[in-house]
Image (cartoon, rainbow, N blue to C red):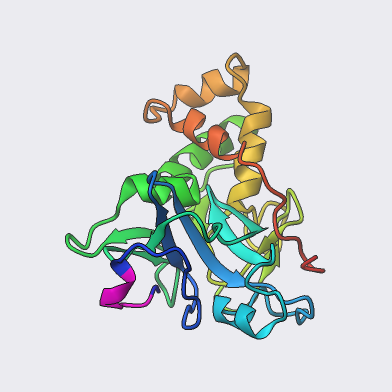
Amino acid sequence: MPRKSSSSSNPTHVLDISSWQGGELISSVDGEVRCYLGYRSERQPFKLPWYAPSVALRDKGGRDSHRFVELRAGLLRTSSLPRTEQPQKLLTDRWLVLPRGTDSSFGVIDRQTRRLDEELTRRLFGGTCDDIESVAQALARVVGRGFHEMMRLPRVTFSKTQSNSCDLTGCLIPKNFPYLAFNQSQYAWGHVSLFGFYRLLGFLCPPRSAVRDAMERSELAAGAIDMLVEAGSQYGEPLSYPSYE
């Protein structure tokens, strides 16, 4: 979670990353919000997806590198910090939640209301858990992946013990990060990254397609498919598994 520091709400030209632990939310003057989960050293251990961002200060040129792990529309990619001449601030009225323990919920929480900030959640993850599961279930019914209500498949879930690779793209799914399970974990489509799912929808659901028409008959919320397809159009190469390079 972000630091609970009263001074971090003030705009600054040079972001202090000395105590960042991950999940930091940064807002620019034009309202763009970026989220940094970690930093990837050039000597990254095989089993560690990333370090805390503060490690960048101990690497030569780390702070100015393009090795910070950014979350944008469900895509985990390496990115740089905002330029120092651009005013920005840490958001202290919101915090990032990732799955933990037995709770698979995720998103951005409003500190005052303690409720999900759906707009920011969609900007960072591509959709809310309900958005993603509803579209995944509609797709499963149409393409024959099967929909098992008793087993809650497909569903958004996470791994508490290990990182996995996406069955569709091969990209990294870190432990304690949400992904879609269309099947049991030992079978194909047991691990589908958010990024992989959004790209799949982009392929299957152009404006005019039989798959889209059939899915929309499943009483989906208006625009649900388009929202996730748009999330899949984000630019950036996803973190890969297993090389992490």
- Residue 39: name its quadrant: bottom right
Q: Position of residue 197 (x, y in %)?
A: 61, 44
Image quadrant in which the N terminus is located: bottom left
Q: Nearer the viewer, residue 7 or 179?
A: 7
Magenta-drawn segment: 3-8
Which of the 4 image quarters holds residue 55? Answer: bottom right
Specify whether residue 6 is painted magenta: yes
Give residue 77's quadrant in the image: bottom right
* Numbered label tally: 0
Q: Is residue 229 magenta?
A: no
In the drawing, does residue 168 fall left or right of residue 193? right
Q: Which residue: 65% across, 86% down?
A: 58
Residue at 37% from the left image edge and 30% from the top image edge: 221
In front here: 34 or 145?
Answer: 34
Q: Does the rendering let one see residue 158?
A: no
Query: Residue 94, can we see it?
Result: yes
Q: Residue at x 50, y 76 (%)?
A: 17
Q: For this rendering, which residue is in front, 34 or 77?
A: 34
Image x and y of residue 152, in percent? 47, 54
Quarter holding the C terminus is: bottom right
Name, please, the residue furthest toward the front.
85
Question: Could you say which is closer to the camera, residue 72 or residue 210?
Answer: 72
